[in-house]
Image: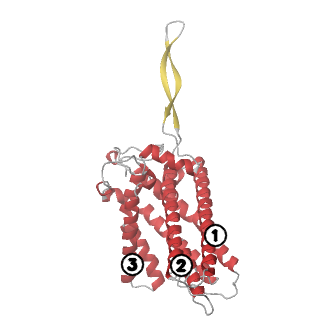
Amino acid sequence: MSGVAQHLVRRALDRSSEPGSPDVAAWKYAILIATALVFVTCLGTIHYIYQQVVMTLVMVESHPTDSILVSTPAATSDKKTTDIEAEVVVAHPEPLPLNLFRTMGDLRSRAGRMAPFRGVSLWVFSHMMQYSAGRFFTAILPLSSPWSYHLGAICAALLVGRLRLTWTHVVVSEPSSKWWSNRMPSFRVYKSVLAATAIFAVANQLQDLIVGNIRLAIGLDLVSQHPASPVAFRSEAFTDWSFQVLNPAVASLLVFVFLQVPARLVLTRVQASTLPDEDETIVPFDRSFDGKVVPAVLGGSGALSLKDAWNSMDWKVGRRLAVVYAKIVALELFMMGFFAAVFVAEVVLLRTVPKGGH
C-alpha cells in the first residue's frame, strides 16, 4: 500500500516537471506528501487493528458456551435414589462482534482504552528485527539474488519467531503488568511451534513468488521493489492498465485465501495453545482444544500439533473468519478509494494555482 502512495506522488511530481507544466512550489509538494503520509498511517492503523489483532482473536475463539452432562442423585417414590443426568451450561465471555466498529469498543471494554493497539511496540520491533535479519541472510547466502532473498526471509522469520509467539500471547491474553520482554516463552516452548512458523514463512514467500511473477510477466512495476523470481519475464502484449492491476489483485487474493490464511490459522492456534496457565484470555478460548493439547508435565509437548490445529477448527470459526476478512477488505478498499479521490482533487487544484500563488 505504501508503494501505491509512493507511486502516485512520484507520478504527480513527474507530471509537474514535464515541459510546459507550471512550476510547482515547495508547499505544493508538501501537501501531496502529507496526504500520502496520512493515507499510509490510516491504512497501517486499519491493518494492525483488524488484520492483525482482530483476525488473531477470531482465529482462536471457541464457542461462547459449553455444555456438560453431570449426574445428580434424585429420590424416587420408594425412597431409592437414582442418577439423573442434567445439562449444565458453563458461560464464557462472548466472542467479538462481527461489526468492525463495535469491535473497537468491545476490545476497549475488555482490555482498556489502548486494547486495539495491544502489542504494537512488539509487532514493530519484531518486523524491524526480521527485516534486518533478512537483509543479513540475503547478503551472506551463496545463492543468486532472488533465491537468496526468499531463503533469507524464511531464515529471518524463524529467527524472530519467538518474538511473534510472544506477540500472540500478548494479544489473546488480558492486560498484564509485565513487559513483553518478561513474557517471552522459553526456547523449549518455541521449539514446539517452530514447524508452524516455518510453514507460515514459506507460505509468505510463495505468495511473493507467485504474485510477483504475474506482475513482472504482464509488465507491472507498481509496487515490487525487488526481483520476485529468477524466472520472471516481461511481456509487452499486456498493456491495458485494468488488466495489469486486476490480474495481480485476483491472484494475490486467491493465494492469500488458499495458502497464507490456512498457514496463519494453523500457526496462530499452535501459538495460542502454548499460552501460560496464569494468563487469562480476553475471548472465549478452549486452552485444551478439545483435549488435544497434552501438558508437558504429563509427557506431552504442551502445544497443539499441526494436524490438530487445523482439524480442531469448526465451520463457525471459518465462517466468522471469512465475514471479518471480507469486511476488512471492504474497509481498506473504501479507504483507498477515498484517499485516491482526495489525492486526485489535490493534484488538479494545485496545478490550477498560478506560479507564486498562496
- Residue 175 percent across, percent down from the top left: 37, 47
Can the viewer see residue 172?
Answer: yes
Q: Residue at x 50, y 78 (%)?
A: 27
Residues at marks 1 and 3, CA–CA distance in whole angstroms: 36 Å
Q: Foreground: 31 or 132? A: 31
Residue placed farthest to the top in the image? 78
Q: Foreground: 305 or 338? A: 338
Identity, as a three-letter code, of the amino acid under mark 3: Arg
The colour scheme used here is secondary structure
Q: Earlier in the sequence, mark 2 or mark 3?
A: 2
Dot 1 falls on a residue whose secondary structure is: helix
Left or right? Give the position of 79 relative to 341. left
Label 3 belongs to which residue?
135
Identity, as a three-letter code, of the amino acid under mark 2: Lys
Q: Earlier in the sequence, mark 1 or mark 2?
A: 2
Which image quarter is the C terminus in? bottom right
Q: Marks 1 and 3: CB-CB under 8 Å?
A: no
- Answer few, some or many: residues within 10 Å of disc 1's Cα (few below 14, many 20 plus, some between 14 and 19): few
Dot 3 falls on a residue whose secondary structure is: helix
Label 1 belongs to which residue?
341
Q: Marks 2 and 3: CB-CB under 8 Å?
A: no
- Residue 329 percent across, percent down from the top left: 60, 61
Q: Earlier in the sequence, mark 1 or mark 3?
A: 3
Q: Residue at x 67, y 73 (%)?
A: 246
